[in-house]
Image (tube, grey):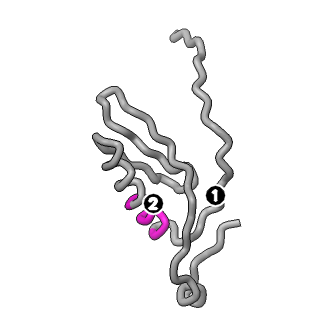
């Protein structure tokens, strides 16, 4: 269960280490796109993997500040690509 940050709790928290699952894809233009499923609207993109990883750390911190709560972090199980047949009407 996520816990709200309050003024009373803020002084208790000096540093907290959180682990997030980050999904990384490569777009048609070659750019790397990262999404953090545990955080609402938490995504970024970059042209290189080192740049992407730096940006992901920054955007996670921004999303935590905006949400103002520690999210429930789900256990990562895996990723599956799936092909489906689709006929457009």
Q: Nearer the viewer, residue 72 or 24?
A: 24
Q: How many marks?
A: 2
Residue at (51% x, 66% y) in the render: 67
Left or right: residue 61 compared with residue 45: right
Looking at the image, tell me whether mark 2 or mark 1 is earlier in sequence order: 2
20 lies above or below 64: above
Where on the picture, by quarter, is residue 16?
A: bottom right
Marks 2 and 1 in Cβ contact (< 8 Å) = no
Circle 2 residues within 10 Å: few <14, some 14–19, many ≥20: many
The answer to if 40 sits in the magenta stretch is: no
Residue at (66% x, 53% y) in the render: 74
Predominant SS along the magenta part: helix
69 lies above or below 30: below
Residue 31, given in percent of the width and then of the height, sits at 32, 36
Residue 19, given in percent of the width and then of the height, sits at 57, 59
Find the residue positioned furthest to the right. 1
Where on the picture, by quarter, is residue 13?
A: bottom right
Question: For the magenta stretch, what is the residue range?
Answer: 58-65
- Mark 1 highlights which residue? 73
- Quarter in which the N terminus is drawn: bottom right
Q: Secondary structure at mark 1?
A: loop
Residue 84 is marked as none
13 lies above or below 30: below
Residue 14, given in percent of the width and then of the height, sits at 52, 83
Circle 1 residues within 10 Å: few <14, some 14–19, many ≥20: some
Residue at (47% x, 52% y) in the render: 41
Residue 60 is marked as 2
Left or right: residue 76 compared with residue 42: right
Residue 81, given in percent of the width and then of the height, sits at 58, 26
Separation (CA) of disc 2 from disc 1: 13 Å
Left or right: residue 24 compared with residue 19: left
Q: Secondary structure at mark 2?
A: helix
């Amino acid at each position: 269960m996520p816990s709200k940050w309050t003024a009373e709790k803020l002084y208790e928290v000096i540093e907290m280490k959180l682990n997030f699952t980050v999904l990384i894809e490569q777009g048609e233009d070659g750019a790397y796109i990262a999404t953090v499923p545990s955080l609402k609207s938490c995504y970024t993109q970059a042209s290189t993997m080192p740049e992407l990883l730096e940006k992901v750390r920054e955007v996670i911190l921004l999303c935590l500040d905006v949400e103002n709560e520690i999210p429930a972090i789900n256990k990562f199980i895996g990723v599956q690509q799936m092909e489906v047949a689709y006929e457009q009407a």
